[in-house]
Amino acid sequence: MINGTVVDLSRTQFAATALYHYLFVPLTLGLSFLLAAMETVYVTTGKPIYKDMARFWGKLFMINFALGVATGLTMEFQFGTNWSFYSSFVGDIFGAPLAIEGLMAFFMESTFVGLMVFGWDRLSRGQHLAVTWLVALGSNLSALWILIANSFMQDPSGAAFNPVTMRMELTSFQELIFNSDAQSKFVHTSIAGYVTAAIFVAGVSAWYMLRNRHMELAKRSFRMAALYGVLATVGVITLGDALGFVAAHAQPTKLAAMEGQWKSEPAPMPFNLIAFPDQARQENHYAIQVPALLSLLVTHSLDGTVPGIDALQRRAALRVENGIPAVEALKVLSKDPANAAALAGFNAHRQDLGYGFLAQRYEADPGKATAGEIAQAARDSIPPVASVFWAFRLMVGLGLLMLAFFVLALLYTLPNVVHRKTWFLKVAVWMIPVPFLANEFGWLTAELGRQPWTVYGVLPTWMSASTHSVAYMAFSLIGFVALYTAFISVEMYLMMRAVRQGPEENWRIES
Amino acid sequence: MNPYAMLQVTWWLLLGVLLIGLAVMVGMDMGVGTILRYVGRSDIERRVALNIIGPHWDGNQVWFILGGGAIFAAFPLIYATAFSGFYVVMLLLLWTMIVRPLGFEYRSKIPSSAWRNAWDWSLLVSGAVPMIVFGAAFGNLFHGVPFHFEWNLTSVYTGSFLGLLNPFAILCGLLSLALSVMMGGLTVMNGAEGPMHGRARTVVQVGAAAAVVLFAAGGAWVHAIPGFSIVSGPGAGVAQTPLRQLVEAVPGAWQGNFSARPSLWLLPAIGFAGMAGALLAARAGRSHLGWWFGALAWIGVIGTAGAALFPFLLPSSEDPSMSLTVWNSSSSQLTLTWMLVMAVVFVPLVLWYTSWAFYVMRGKVRAERVAHDEHAY
Amino acid sequence: MKTFAFFVLYMLLAVVVILLAVLLGADGAWYFAWLVGTAMIVLIAAAGAAMLDAQEEQAAGRVAGKPEPRT
């Protein structure tokens, strides 16, 4: 039996390393295409200012990219080191997109990024432009395969449990990659990266304009970022809606937690704008509601409904009871794969195997589970509502803030007067942290909302972790946090230093 | 052989190709990091050495990431069991490897010599430690690793961290370090001129000579290590768990494959020939030829280890019957098929554009250029 | 005041675009949409920069002979 503290520490470590990693990734996703845009203008118009821009933002890109690569190394191996049972249980499906990510995308991104930095003098303009586009394409294809893998955890389609090998196995590669959660989540995440880069470039450009430095570069960068950002923000919001729509079908408990919906209600359901959910009493202490909005948002109609947590928990209790015989049959099959009675018993209950595992947390032999333990297992099937509810609202709130910012940015940059709007430039500098926060809240919404599962409805988190000792986990968690914190301090220092130094104005004369 | 068994063997071979790619491509960058402080005496010399691999280290490192991903996709039980069992070793590997990208990217961004010196040391550690860990991990496979499975295939590692640092494993770790130093030296020779070229030549000769000795010693030592042998089990190409077989420890079993197929002796011969060729080519100043000999040496060494262990991937010293083999730890037939399709399409593509990148950046790295290029490492 | 009016107008426009996209794309071919959308966003950003060049040249032309102050 796995120690609960070890599971909690493993989760903390995964969340910490993923959240650190995810500070750097979105900027890479978005800035790479923005670099491609700048270089495209350079190659088509031949104006050297755009080459300066591509090189300057490229330098900041690389400072960020190095940490994205470094922290990404951990992610590739952490499933094996800390989520051993998870890895063997779903590796047949989950490992494939990870390997394809390396083969198809990360190789492309990493090989060409070297040429992008070192190849200015060795490649023709057209070749270098192609290289930059390939870096951008490669980094976003990386995100594609990672999110296909992640979507399998949210909505495990294209796979089935095989009692002979005692694990989940792939049944349809097409279903895996065209999973509707994967489709909308990839686009949502990729263009959230564009928004991040747009705010970053706009903010740094505003900082220059405030000081009347590098005006040509700053005005052009700001203009490009504003256009790129406003379109991307509109896209992110659209895809966010699509994701909610998908989750309403595939992950009803996540959706109920995001909306703080404790009770099932008749249509049209009101939307909790602000509420203070209480997990123990299963109610909101206080709520400001907008009538009918929830039905509109998640079902795109006025007469649609989604189940509340009360109904979902009742459904979970039934599934736990139904899943327990599946676990017991599996135990028999583990010793004697030829046992026909056990196989028949397993097949009769197999769709609720995961829920049987939820009960196993309290009773190693789940056949002995009491009514109280089954009720507890059903309660476990509900994610931590307050955290998910607020992470989601913060993400959406920051997203709307960015939309307003970009609309205003467009109003000022299109007539080319933004450099005179000092107050707005100051706001732009202060906007820089906003997308990074929104990205982290998005990650928290998606992954906390998935609890208590690592693979929704199939494999509970408590079973997934490796069987390490508490001492090992404390050691590694402290090590990662210390190391990453040191790195991020160095990175921020170098980034600010490079921004203060500004673009190299004379490099063309030197070389 | 049924189609599933053929896929399993194909993926075992492909895994070998990926590991060789990892050893050659990452190994040479690691080697440059390890010898950086020796071949580069001044700051500008060290910058020259770093800029020789500057355009390529990032792409090369993907061999490492792909290695992890491919083990996950093709042999998930190995990924799950080995990486969690080797926990502290994996942390050592990850923590040192994480420092490396920053060493390349951040070292020369600030002129302070204390700053640069600190990064030079970190590049040494992050070059040497991972290579020792790679080799030691391979060495431990010959002894077997203490782990077992529960009824639902939860893997439990019962050994300690220090148990993984046994003498044979350390010898394998040193062999891997020697080969990487040799390749690092050849890489510096390819891109540097003058005194650095000469120092790198010395490094290659020391590395290659050490590799010859260590490879021979390791080969002799393996005779004293009891091998593992499958007594009974479902066999190749049959869906199964590792709870279904009987495995015994048998003295001399690691020589079994070589006795059955004497042509396998070609593999260690290729290893020795590669090392000797690299040494002689470096002496003659023909470092590009030497580099290819070095790659051949890696093929020989990894091929020899793989051929000795086959079909074992991760033997269990605690309960040999729970040992992981190519047959009981691979992915399903459908996953292996799709992954093979991907590999057939993308591995040649990767090799093609990687070669193009090396072609574009060919030639010597000159100190004046490095000093004047703000984007250089 | 004029700026505020335009701000409200553009925000409304953004909301309308989002609503339209939501209704049209309830079960969208999002991978394809990403491909087309990304190309479009990048090209529009590039066009915006080219437009800025034109604007500045025009402004410089109006102040006869005097180029924009360069930094």
Image (cartoon, coloured by chain):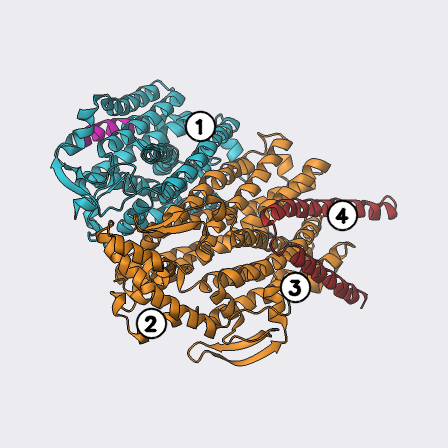
Q: Are marks 4 and 2 in contact (CB under 8 Å)?
A: no
Instruction: Find the distance from the CA under tag 4 to the CA under tag 2.
Output: 66 Å
Q: Where is mark 2, residue-wise? A: A374
Categorize mark 4 by other alpha carbons within 10 Å: few (<14), some (14-19), many (20+): some
Q: Are marks 2 and 1 in contact (CB under 8 Å)?
A: no
Categorize mark 2 by other alpha carbons within 10 Å: few (<14), some (14-19), many (20+): many
Q: Which mark is drawn over residue C52?
A: 4
The chain carrying label 3 is A
Instruction: Find the distance from the CA under tag 2 to the CA under tag 1.
Output: 67 Å
Instruction: Find the distance from the CA under tag 4 to the CA under tag 3.
Output: 22 Å
- Residue B134 is at least partly visible in this image: yes
Figure quadrant of residue A466: bottom left
User: What amino acid is at disc 2?
Assistant: Ile
In the image, residue B214 lies in the stretch drawn in magenta: yes
| Residue B234 vertical position relative to residue B152 in the rendered view, above or below | above
Mark closer to the observer (4, 1): 4
Q: Nearer the viewer, residue A475 or A371?
A: A371
Residue A98 vs residue A344: left or right? right
Q: Quadrant of the N terminus of chain B?
A: top left
Residue numbers of the magenta segment: B207-219
Across and down, in percent, residue B106 comes to 47, 46
The residue sitting at 68% across, 49% down in the picture is A224
The chain carrying label 2 is A
The chain painted cyan is B
Q: Where is mark 3, residue-wise? A: A427
Q: Are marks 4 and 3 in contact (CB under 8 Å)?
A: no
Q: Which mark is drawn over residue B191?
A: 1
Categorize mark 3 by other alpha carbons within 10 Å: few (<14), some (14-19), many (20+): some
The residue sitting at 81% across, 44% down in the picture is C57
